[in-house]
Image (tube, rainbow, N blue to C red):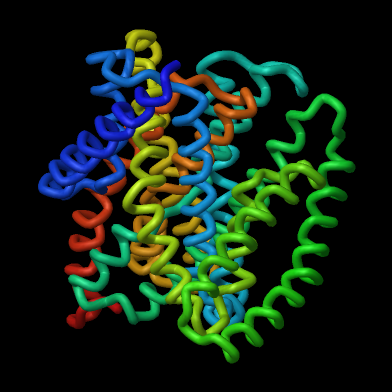
Amino acid sequence: METYVLFKDLAIILVSAKLCGLAAAKLKAPQVVGEIIAGVLIGPSILGLVQQTEFISGMAEIGVVLLMFFAGLQTSLRDLMRTGWKALLIACAGVFVPLAGGYLLYCLYYGFAPNGSSQFYSALFTGVIMTATSVSITVASLQELGFLKSETGTTIMSAAIIDDVIGIIVLTFVVGMKDPASDPTAVIASTALFFAAAIVFGWLIYRLFLYLDKRWPHTRRIPILGFVVAFSMAYVAEKYFGIADITGAYVAGIVLCSIKDSDYIARKVDVSSYMLFAPVFFASIGLKTSIDDMTPALLLFCLLFVVVALVTKIIGCGAMSKVLGYSTNDAMKIGVGMMTRGEVALIVAQKGLAVGMIQAKYFTAVILLILVSSVITPILLKILYAKKVGGAQAA
């Protein structure tokens, strides 16, 4: 392919992603949904203006690494440490119940398969996709309602942080299982070894950045070196530990999230990601999404996927909250607040496609889940917080 064609593809992707993203925002939907739809429109399924190429795939992979690095930078270790055992248990239930629900849905719909078969891994990964939580919509809703710093609001935020960490570990473990040369024990050992190495070398990197931050505060060399750490850890994770590259990028963000210039690094990462790499990543999902394969049976599965993903989050997080002593109304708030899905679900699905665990046609289900959860979560939260408990508004 001629080199100049790459510029045409990038121009079409960026302008269509931005226009569709703005349209989605006007409709109160996440902009990422619009960017994905843009990929579908300009891709082979409809207009055929852009084809999926190795160049676009490479750009998209950089985009997903930067997104996870940014997510790690935005993580508060202080909040993570003080969330307590309640948030930990809620997060664990919020991962386990959707994981089991997604696996059972796939098996009941397509049939149970023996361990190790491609159908078994597809069923398992369907559950993995459902574990992801994205609380950006929830945060905006709670802030608008004035309950972001309430007990339930704090619990939702704390559980969501832990949920992301557990979700990344689950993703790493399941992807490792797909390797024919691996066994569960080896996968666990490799995962444990990676995180042990990340703690040791992460501490050394952290100390180095403290020195650099003190010597050259708020200079461009700091975020440049941050990029080096992110890409290096992504490479090492995948190359030497068999761990997903996005896990390495996420850990790199956590390593640097406590230095003084972490927000400065995050802003630079966000600019690079927002301007170019993230739109290419989300549009590439649309390019790979095939609506030609849509059948009544697949459409029904997509609808069931959305229902199961939403209900299992409410059941997992809400039931655990109730067990921990929250009122029924507060438990429902926590369950509903944790059911939104966003970028992380797409990133997980993308990784599943890359390793052959799911097919491109199932991206439709993930996109539908993000859209539905983003629309109904603010509505349900407003209803739940409007309820009176004993003559006073619930906290």
Q: How many marks?
A: 0
Q: Residue at x 21, y 78 (%)?
A: 393
Q: Position of residue 3 (x, y in %)?
A: 42, 25
Quadrant occupied by the N terminus:
top left
Q: Position of residue 2 (x, y in %)?
A: 42, 18
Q: Quadrant of the C terminus?
A: bottom left
Report the side of 263 relative to 303 (left or right): right
Pick whichever, 165 or 19, lies toward us: 19
The answer to whether residue 304 is seen in the rendering is no
Residue positioned 74% across, 76% down in the render = 203
Q: Is residue 143 left or right of residue 329?
A: left
Query: Residue lying furthest left in this view?
Result: 26
**Residue shown at the point (61%, 59%) measured from the top left:** 230
How far across and down, in percent of the image, does residue 251 sit? 64, 62
Q: Is residue 236 above or below residue 258?
A: above
Q: Residue furthest bottom?
A: 214
Q: Position of residue 9 (x, y in %)?
A: 32, 27
- Note whether 356 is above or below 233 in the view shown: above
* Residue 272 is at least partly visible in this image: yes
- Is 251 positioned to the left or the right of 6 in the image? right
Q: To which quarter of the image does residue 385 belong?
A: bottom left
Residue ID at (43%, 19%): 361
